[in-house]
Amino acid sequence: MHCQSGFRSYLAHRVLDQAGLDSAMLSGGMLTLRAALPDLVLERG
């Protein structure tokens, strides 16, 4: 899961973790990812 600021993906991460599923979280969401990797091209699909 991902979202712009990271809050909704944080909630999803918690739900997945509590269900025993493997998940990871990037603090700051897509805003942080785009700042760290400005040339990254993301496709919807």
Image: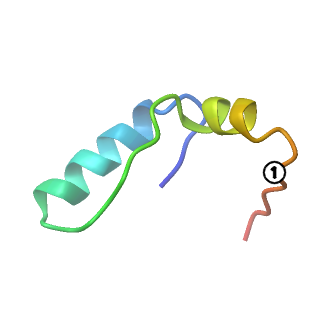
Image: 25 above or below 23: above
Image: 20 above or below 5: below
Residue at point 47% right, 55% down? 1
Secondary structure state at the residue bearing disc 1 = loop
The location of residue 42, given as percent across then percent down, is 78, 57
The residue nearer to you, when weighing 36 against 42, is 36
Label 1 crowd bin: few (<14), some (14–19), many (20+), radius 10 Å: few
Q: Amino acid at mark 1?
A: Leu
The reply, left or right, for residue 38 in relation to residue 23 is right
The location of residue 17, given as percent across then percent down, is 19, 56
The location of residue 25, given as percent across then percent down, is 39, 45
Quadrant of the drawing holding the C terminus: bottom right
Residue at point 21% right, 52% down? 15
Residue furthest front as drawn: 36
Q: How is the image coloured?
A: rainbow
Residue at point 26% right, 66% down? 22
The location of residue 2, given as percent across then percent down, is 53, 48
Q: Quadrant of residue 18?
A: bottom left
The reply, left or right, for residue 30 in relation to residue 42 is left
The residue nearer to you, when weighing 23 against 15, is 23
Q: Which residue is mark 1?
A: 40
The residue nearer to you, when weighing 28 against 37, is 37
